Image (spheres, grey):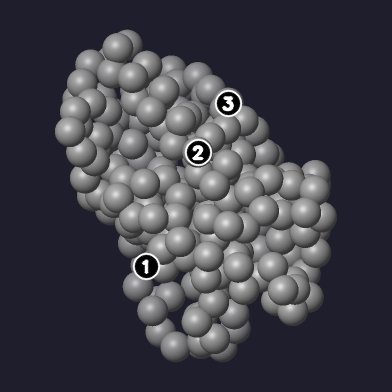
Amino acid sequence: MATLILVRHGRSTANTAGVLAGWTPGVHLDERGAAQAAELPRRLAGLPIAAVVSSPLERCAQTLRPLLDARPGLQPHTDDRIGECHYGDWSGRKLKELSGEPLMEVVQQHPSAAAFPGGESMRAMQARAVDAVRDWNARVETEHGEDALYVMCSHGDIIKAIVADALGLHLDLFQRIHVEPCSVTAIRYTRTRPFLLRLGDTGDLSGFAPRGGPDQGGSGDAVVGGGTGAP
């Protein structure tokens, strides 16, 4: 079956503001995010990309634009199922503020039981994203052959949920996975099992150096929606 190249969107204005964006309009790549996106064609050079699928949110479309400009034969497809989690009433709020909500402990420790007020459950988020991957795997293989690979640009929690499914991990363990902005995660699907080939690859090891801030997870908590990445 197909090989899936998952790309998290580049760093956004919501990431740097410490805001949980969700589907909030007006969220774009910041200066660093645009630079990250500009590097994507070089990082994926030489790969025979058969198709490109994107979340409908603007920060993903912006991330893919340089790649599509470099490969004019590729026409992007949009799939709402790989759009960001619907955080409902949490959308647009500061992560520091949300850390005090009782629901945050459930999101961190028992995400399969978490449902955002006015939004969706994390179980539903994972189910729709995994369904999208299964459908696109079949479509890409039918149209381009079983050795084809394709790119899917999405969001931190969506990618983590897809990786957890590929590894056979319960959703309650998905907060142990971290993917940085504009990182590349690769999963090769076969008839009997998936293989995780890369996870959160940015080609930059500077993010491993100690630094302050919530992305380091000093409290043991994961950053909901994904962190800001290396400075």
Amino acid on which the number 1 mark rests in the picture? Asp
Upstream in the sequence, badge 3 or badge 2?
3
Query: Can you say whether 88 is above or below 74 in the image?
Result: below
For the N terminus, give its image quadrant.
Answer: top left
- Asked if the residue under mark 2 is in contact with the one under mark 3, i.e. CB atoms within 8 Å, the reply is no
- Density class for disc 3 (Cα within 10 Å; few <14, some 14-19, many ≥20) is some
Residue located farthest toward the top when viewing the structure as drawn: 143
- Residue 205: image location, x then y, percent: 35, 73
- Residue 96: image location, x then y, percent: 73, 77
- Density class for disc 1 (Cα within 10 Å; few <14, some 14-19, many ≥20) is few
The residue tagged 1 is 204
The residue tagged 3 is 78
Please identify the quarter of the rendering in which residue 183 is found. bottom left
Q: Is residue 146 visible?
A: yes
| Residue 9, numbered circle | none
Query: Can you say whether 97 is above or below 185 in the image?
Result: below
As rendered, which of 78 and 34 lies closer to the eye? Answer: 78
Query: Can you say whether 20 is above or below 2 in the image?
Result: below
Query: Can you say whether 225 is above or below 186 in the image?
Result: below
Amino acid on which the number 3 mark rests in the picture? Thr
For the C terminus, give its image quadrant.
Answer: bottom right
* Rendered residue at 43%/75% (across/down): 207
Amino acid on which the number 2 mark rests in the picture? Ala
* Rendered residue at 53%/65% (across/down): 110
